[in-house]
Amino acid sequence: MSCQGEGSVSVDVPTVAVSYRLRCGGVVPEVAYHEISLRASHRPGSVVVTAPSAVIWAATVGRGDRAEREPSGIG
């Protein structure tokens, strides 16, 4: 999850009752990595992202093997 702008992004995963808030960077994008391990990953689910219109955000959501983080210092 990454976001930029004045405000924050709320992320909810209702199927497993997980939620978090990411405070966004005003000029420099804020980036956070979250991983949720599920026993029943075959169950249907959804991810809900809520943010004010002044916030630009992006998320990667996947199902399967553990994701690898991007090496720091790239970009």
Image (cartoon, rainbow, N blue to C red):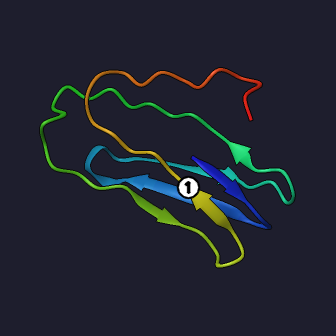
Across and down, in percent, residue 14 comes to 32, 54
Position of the C terminus by quadrant: top right
33, 17: nearer the viewer: 33
Residue appearing at x 59%, y 25% in the figure: 70
In the picture as drawn, the residue positioned furthest to the bottom comes out as 53
71 relative to 24, above or below: above
61, 35: nearer the viewer: 61
Q: In which quarter of the image is residue 54?
A: bottom right
Residue appearing at x 74%, y 66% in the figure: 7
Residue 13 placement, left or right of 30: left
Q: In which quarter of the image is residue 36?
A: top left
Residue appearing at x 83%, y 50% in the figure: 28
* Amino acid type indicated by mark 1: Ala
27 relative to 17, above or below: below
9 relative to 40, above or below: below
Label 1: which residue? 58
Across and down, in percent, residue 3 comes to 67, 55
Residue appearing at x 48%, y 62% in the figure: 49
Q: Is mark 1 on a helix, strand or loop?
A: strand
In the picture as drawn, the residue positioned furthest to the right comes out as 27
Would you call the spot at circle 1 few (<14 residues within 10 Å), some (14-19), or many (20 or more)?
A: few
- The number of callouts visible is 1
